[in-house]
Amino acid sequence: MRTMQQLYKRIPEEPMNIARIKIASLVSFILAGAAMVLQAGAAQAATKTQWIDYKQGATALSGYLIYDDAVQARRPGVLMIHDRSGFSANTLKDAEMIAKLGYVVFAEDIFGKGIVPKDVPEMTRLITIYNTDRPLMRARALAGLDALKAQPMVDPTKLAGIGYCFGGTTGIELIETGAPLLGFISVHGSFNNFTPEAAKNIKGRVLILHGAEDPVAPMEEVNAVVSQLRAAKVNFELNLYSGTTHGFTQPQNPSEVRADEQYKVAMARFFKDVLAQ
């Protein structure tokens, strides 16, 4: 390739306007090449998503996998458990947010492949099935964990979980089976009907992020689960957000806007701690 000095030496040999055109063309060519390199790099770092089909017994399930495919080495995995709305737009958005922290995120399917409730009565009907059948709830959650561990880009020794609302309940049931999660986060979860002595099976840390004015899971429920965790000597944290009710990750007032921001900071810090990122 000719140096710029060599190019300039040619300028007197040609009409000035032609030389300027050639230099401008060369600069344009170089800039275009640089742009292509940058675009290629961005493409290589693109977030990859796919639906993973799996089963729990005879029930067909399909979970949402999302990760940065530019990373070649195995990395920590986060099991995400959806709220009562199933695979809503908010569920997929939250999965993307967590994946951007550097984790492979698998949003597992509790309701069944293709089942997305269309209204609150249907949501209530679906979650009642699992709230009243805790062995089924645990089995469904464990199936999703197995699907996450089976992904080739996941380090199976570095796993954590997070559950929203109904997913927070499901996640507590999951870790009380002794599932190998280094940490679990319950975000505005519900804490009734747990088996008190099962807390001794929890292997990792627990972070509860909760609205102090939550009418769905009032402080009596929170205090009960905290007592169970204390009795079992579980390493846990409890963050209460004043002025917030249920579902503060979809904020309806200034206090919930604050809680929504603060929970994301707490979540990122917790995952970094337990997954050594």
Image (cartoon, rainbow, N blue to C red):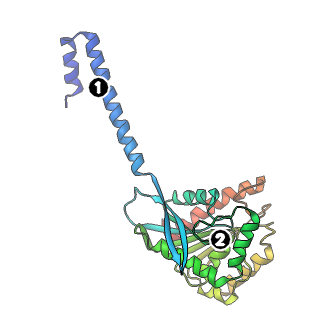
Say if 153 sits above or below 22 in the image.
below
Camera sees residue 45: yes
Characterize the local packing of mark 2: few (<14), some (14-19) or many (20 or more) Cα atoms within 10 angstroms: many
Q: Quadrant of residue 62?
A: bottom right
Which of discs 1 and 2 lies nearer the camera? The answer is: 2
Which one is nearer the viewer's eye here, 144 or 230?
A: 144
Which amino acid does the dot numbered 1 rest on?
Leu
Residue placed under numbered mark 2 in the picture: 167
Residue 237 percent coordinates (x, y): 66, 73
Camera sees residue 182: no
Say if 23 sits above or below 154 in the image.
above
Which amino acid does the dot numbered 2 rest on?
Gly
Residue 116 percent coordinates (x, y): 64, 64
Q: Residue at 61% across / 72% down in the picture? A: 110
Q: Quadrant of residue 255?
A: bottom right
Which one is nearer the viewer's eye here, 215 or 202?
A: 215
